[in-house]
Amino acid sequence: MAALNTYNLDLCIEICERVSNGENIKSILDSDKNKYPTFKTFCNWKRDNIELLHLYTRSREDKAEIVDSEIDAVIKKLTNGQLDPASARVIIDAY
């Protein structure tokens, strides 16, 4: 079956919920090529559908909150002596 090309708001909500939970958009779309659109199609949908643009923007903001929380956890481990400074820096730089 070919990748999805017809805009589907419910599917976009599902995708954006996964992004909100910290997943990468390309990984999500590649995880099921029969269910999800290609990355290019998703980008076109964002350009053509303001509701999706806003939904995706909010999901990226939510994902940023997760990253912020993970960085705080690394700082706490550094402060408690559970991580050495070099390791903490590498982890934070990766975020």
Image (cartoon, rainbow, N blue to C red):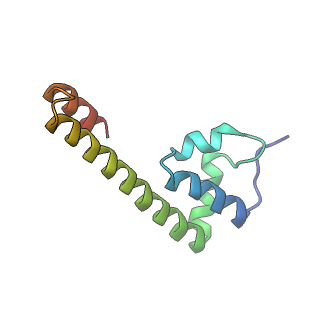
Q: Is residue 43 visible?
A: no
Image coords of residue 40 (percent x, y) = 61, 49
Quarter placement of the C terminus: top left
Identify the residue shown where x is 43% and y is 54%: 63
Where is the N terminus found, in terms of image quarters? top right
Asked whether, in this view, residue 12 is left or right of residue 75, the answer is right
Front in this rendered view, residue 33 or 90: 90
Please give left or right for residue 23 compared with residue 35 in the image.
left
- Compared with 82, 69 (above or below) is below
Task: State which quadrant residue 8 falls in.
Answer: bottom right
| Front residue of this view, candidates 47 and 17 | 17
Which residue is depicted at the point 59% across and 67% down?
Answer: 52
Q: Nearer the viewer, residue 10 or 72?
A: 72
Q: Position of residue 11 (x, y in %)?
A: 70, 59
Place of residue 29 in the rendered image (x, y in percent of width and height, measured from the top left) = 63, 44
Residue 5, quarter of the rendered image: bottom right
Q: Does residue 6 appear in the picture of this structure?
A: yes
Q: Residue at x 17, y 35 (%)?
A: 78
Q: Residue at x 28, y 43 (%)?
A: 73
Name the side, left or right, on which 28 lies relative to 35. Answer: left
Q: Position of residue 53 (x, y in %)?
A: 53, 67
